[in-house]
Image (spheres, rainbow, N blue to C red):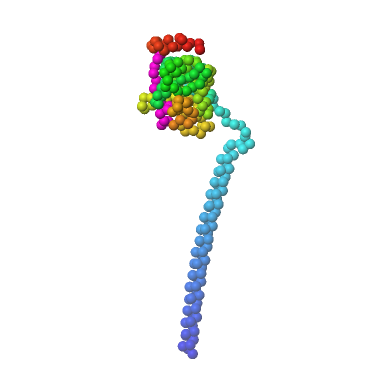
Amino acid sequence: MFLAEKDMAAKLRAVKTFRSVLKVHLESTRYTDCRKIFSVGTKVCFLNLLVSVLVLRSLIATTKTPVRSTIKPSVTQNDSRTPTVLASSPKGLVPDVGKPLLSKPPSTWVDVRLVNKRGFYLIMFENGTIAGSWKRFLTTRYGLFRIQSHGTGIVKLKSLTTMKYIAIGNLGQIYSTANSSNEDTLLKHAQEENHFYSFSSYLYPTTQNHSNRIWLLAIGSKGRIRNASRVSPLHKSHQFQISNIRENSGKSDVKALVHLVEHRGK
């Protein structure tokens, strides 16, 4: 009996010890879980606070400008002392830019004959028809032109037979006009790498034409004037040699002067 009671007492002590250990473990586990829960809650609260601060800051920033304000910002006027710069590329030009150039007389001029790389001379008949010819009697009578300078690389071609100007229209058509104020008469004059010269439209193509190449004055293989919008810059039909006859410096060619006197007024 004594041994049995002893064993029972030992078992009770063991159970009590196990219970106490289990209780301590549970309490420590609860504390840890609570600490974790508290940590997560703190982070959530901090994030909510940060979002609130950002929203409040954005609201303050947007309320600086009145929402119902309809006042438009004033446009700064250009200073009258600032010179107007014309674009050198014909793509960005509009027809109005030619007016200042046309309002002034040409600074210099030279009387010439123009022959392209195919051997055709540029001529203008009395009715204003523009063509190309290699026949001497036609080139002598209708092939005299005056190149008038209206700026750096900007010229006009005037027939000394008809007193009309060569013009390039907005569709690339080549035509003649007696109106010296016509903006289509302004041409870009450039020297090629092979020392030939080219004449292209100063105004066209514009951005509305959606063209990436220049429009060139050219004589076709049969002596017909080509549409300027269809001339390739690599083609030799638009390349001209210039034969000077008379300049405004006073130098002159006697035969050309006689021809001008005979046909003056026609």
Residue drawn at (49%, 18%), measured in percent from left and top?
Answer: 125
- Tell me if residue 234 is in the magenta stretch: yes
Residue drawn at (55%, 49%), measured in percent from left and top?
Answer: 51
Q: Is residue 91 visible?
A: no
Q: Quadrant of residue 247?
A: top left
In the current view of this chain or complex, which residue is farthest to the right?
68
Q: Is residue 67 above or below residue 153?
A: below
Q: Nearer the viewer, residue 199 or 36?
A: 199
Q: Is residue 47 above or below residue 211?
A: below
**Residue 223 at x, y percent in the picture:** 45, 25
Q: Is residue 1 above or below residue 196?
A: below
Q: Is residue 11 above or below residue 119?
A: below
Residue drawn at (47%, 33%), measured in percent from left and top?
Answer: 212
Q: Is residue 230 visible?
A: yes
Q: Nearer the viewer, residue 165 or 126?
A: 126
**Residue 80 at x, y percent in the picture:** 51, 21
- Tell me if residue 24 is in the magenta stretch: no
**Residue 17 at x, y percent in the picture:** 48, 76
The boundaries of the magenta stretch are 233-247
Q: Quadrant of residue 188?
A: top left
